Image (cartoon, rainbow, N blue to C red):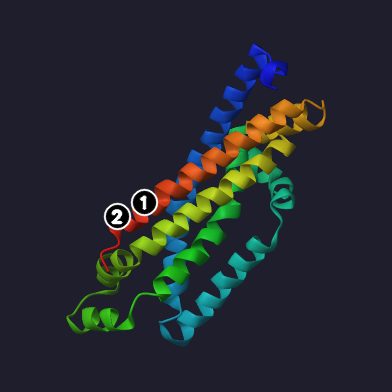
Amino acid sequence: MLDAITPQMWGAIREGFVETMQMLGISGVATILLGLPLGIALFTFNTLGSIGRVIDAILGALVNVTRSFPYAILMVSLIPLTRFLVQTSIGPIAASVSLTIAAVPFFARLVETALRDVPSGKTDAAVAMGSSQIQVIWKVWLPEAMPTLISAMTTTLVTIVGYSAMAGLIGGGGLGRLAYNYGYQRFIGEVMVVTVIILIILVQAIQLIGDWLSRAVDHR
């Protein structure tokens, strides 16, 4: 069945895979760096009295608005910002901008949920011992929530893989572009099958690694 795929096409598939991994790497790291503190802020401000709850409501509204946009619409609407930041609106680096903006609110909500599962007694004990808010975050909340946080990272990375395939339809490159240009528009079904199989394997690998890491750090 794969005889219809020429050596040049295999080269294009390899290039598409590299571009997909590039999008996943850039947006994945940026999402964790931005989404983790945002998720901590969403959880923390809600515990800081009336002013904190107002700030939490504002942040929560911004997160919810961003999450409500379908990714394809979000990516198109962010083209001017993408051009401003990376001087182009096409390619994997450009797609990483919209991928990050789409994934950060999603990951932040998962972080907030993970922190809510930390037993309040451990927080109270740390505060009673004189721990500051920063110490509570780094020495209590994050270590206790680490298995759930890793699961959240895994889910987010899998979501980014799906988004990256859609990004290919709007000039983002990667395997999504190949599947659309050759598998759909040119009716080369073999290319569609190969790209889907690669994406399935990639998602399975991310999930397996994430599950293993989550179990490895879970000492409860």
Residue at the location (46% across, 59% down)?
Answer: 152
Task: Please state which amino acid type lies under the numbered disc 2.
Answer: Ala
Proximity of marks 2 and 1: CB atoms separated by less than 8 Å: yes
Q: Is residue 143 above or below residue 82?
A: below
Q: Which quarter of the image is occupied by the N terminus? A: top right
Residue 85 visible (yes or no)? no
Residue at the location (51% across, 76% down)?
Answer: 55
Judge by depth and name the residue closer to the eye, 137 or 15: 15
The location of residue 21, given as percent across then percent down, is 52, 35
Residue at the location (64% across, 30% down)?
Answer: 194
User: Circle 1 sits on which residue?
Assistant: 212
Give the CA separation, mark 2 to mark 1: 6 Å
Disc number placed over residue 216 in the picture, else none: 2
Circle 2 residues within 10 Å: few <14, some 14–19, many ≥20: few
The location of residue 202, given as percent across then percent down, is 52, 39
- Judged from the image, the secondary structure of the residue bearing numbered disc 1 is helix
Q: Is residue 125 above or below residue 21?
A: below
- Judged from the image, the secondary structure of the residue bearing numbered disc 2 is helix
Disc number placed over residue 96 in the picture, else none: none
Task: Please state which amino acid type lies under the numbered disc 1.
Answer: Trp
Left/right of residue 33 with respect to residue 128 in the rendered view: right
Q: Residue furthest front?
A: 1
Residue 127: quadrant of the picture: bottom left
Left/right of residue 143 with respect to residue 32 in the rendered view: left
The location of residue 18, given as percent across then percent down, is 54, 28
The location of residue 212, given as percent across then percent down, is 36, 51
Q: Residue furthest bottom?
A: 50
Circle 1 residues within 10 Å: few <14, some 14–19, many ≥20: some
Q: Is residue 66 above or below residue 203?
A: below
Residue at the location (61% across, 28% down)?
Answer: 16
